[in-house]
């Protein structure tokens, strides 16, 4: 009993001591996607701010594969000492556990959620050739020809796949999924009417919308897109549940990372993303800065996890 008590005391004393010395060597900021992607760009936005504030290099490390799940697993298994962090997309945390049947991770429970870096609306678009002027007309057309239309995703089991299945369930239309390798790969087929519906961050489709090659129908988010003032949100169109399906990016650490380390990371990131230069860069990426507290971020993640688990169950959505 005495030995056990001393051992427990040793653990409890070791964590504050660890936090007091941290950081005394470089920090690895792990990204689950290739260089140049949106998650990578977000990591490289906050990395220099962390380096400057913490006095140690913060090195972005790309571990791409399995829709970001390889990186998530790497960080889940890392020591909880503040030297390995995860820059994630939302899909890695709240979608993948429900859509990948062989996933051995529970990132909602197995990570410390530090802060949401940014979030952005997504735009539902269709081909300009379809005789529809708004989302209600698209739904009516799809219902008149069930199973004859298709929607494009950036990969089976990813967040766009689940979000568009959620749209299918909420609207009651019968529409088939076609999977592509990345968001930009699907655009030519959308423009050529090989697929009839897509969901993308606005910067991905802005040029095609501006040139009249595709037609925006709906904003998935809590406010209208300023550059598309006449396009309603999902709530305005009568589908409020869909407005949860936004694009977000966050910072996480292995479970058990000391609270002082987590609090420092949250404070540094929240301060950095509120600076005008960072806000400008986020805006180019179609994102608004967030910087919420660990408790707020964790609650948001738990709520999304419950919702997306139910959506995946209703849709029968699971990939190998």
Image (cartoon, grey):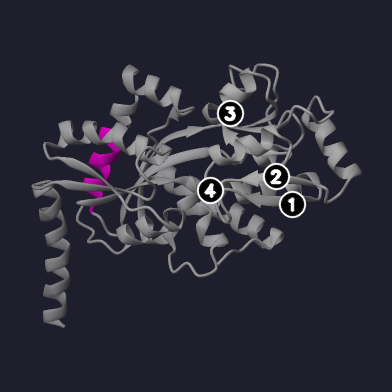
* Eye-nearest disc, 3 or 4: 4
Q: Is residue 138 left or right of residue 165?
A: right
Q: Residue 319 is drawn in which quadrant?
A: bottom right
Q: Are marks 1 and 2 in contact (CB under 8 Å)?
A: yes
Residue in the foreground of this view, choosing between 101 and 259: 101
Task: State the CA–CA distance, disc 3 to disc 2.
Answer: 15 Å
Q: Which mark is residue 266?
A: none
Give the labeled residue for mark 4. 181
The region drawn magenta spans 258-269
Q: Which mark is residue 205?
A: 3
Q: Which mark is residue 151?
A: 2
* Eye-nearest disc, 4 or 2: 4
Provide the secondary structure element on which disc 3 rests: helix
* Residue 19 image offset from top left, x and y in percent: 15, 50
Dominant secondary structure of the residues highlighted in magenta in the image: helix
Residue in the picture at 81% in, 34% down: 138
Placement of 140 over or under 107, stated as above or below: above
Placement of 309 over or under 144, stated as above or below: below
Q: Earlier in the sequence, mark 3 or mark 4?
A: 4
* Residue 264 image offset from top left, x and y in percent: 23, 40
Placement of 1 over or under 318, stated as above or below: below
């Amino acid at each position: 009993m005495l030995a056990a008590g001393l051992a427990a005391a040793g653990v409890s004393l070791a964590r504050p001591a660890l936090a007091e010395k941290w950081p005394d060597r470089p920090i690895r900021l792990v990204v689950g996607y290739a260089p140049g992607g949106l998650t990578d760009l977000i990591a490289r936005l906050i990395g220099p701010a962390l380096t400057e504030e913490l006095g140690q290099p913060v090195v972005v490390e790309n571990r791409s594969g399995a829709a970001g799940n390889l990186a998530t697993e790497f960080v889940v298994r890392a020591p909880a000492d503040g030297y390995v962090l995860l820059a994630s997309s939302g899909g890695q945390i709240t979608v993948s556990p429900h859509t990948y049947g062989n996933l051995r991770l529970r990132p909602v429970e197995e990570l410390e959620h530090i802060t949401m870096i940014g979030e952005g609306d997504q735009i539902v678009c269709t081909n300009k050739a379809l005789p529809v002027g708004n989302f209600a007309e698209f739904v009516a057309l799809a219902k008149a020809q069930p199973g004859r239309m298709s929607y494009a995703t950036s990969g089976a089991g990813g967040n766009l796949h689940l979000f568009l299945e959620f749209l299918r369930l909420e609207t009651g239309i019968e529409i088939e999924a076609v999977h592509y390798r990345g968001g930009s790969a699907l655009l030519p087929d959308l423009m050529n009417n090989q697929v009839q519906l897509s969901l993308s961050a606005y910067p991905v489709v802005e040029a095609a919308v501006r040139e009249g090659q595709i037609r925006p129908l709906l904003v998935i988010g809590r406010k209208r897109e300023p550059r598309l003032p006449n396009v309603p949100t999902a709530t305005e169109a009568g589908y409020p549940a869909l407005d949860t399906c936004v694009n977000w990016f966050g910072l996480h650490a292995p479970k058990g990372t000391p609270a002082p380390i987590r609090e420092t990371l949250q404070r540094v990131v929240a301060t950095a993303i509120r600076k005008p230069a960072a806000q400008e860069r986020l805006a180019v990426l179609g994102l608004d800065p967030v910087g919420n507290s660990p408790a707020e971020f964790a609650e948001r993640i738990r709520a999304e996890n419950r919702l997306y688990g139910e959506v995946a169950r209703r849709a029968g959505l699971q990939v190998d």
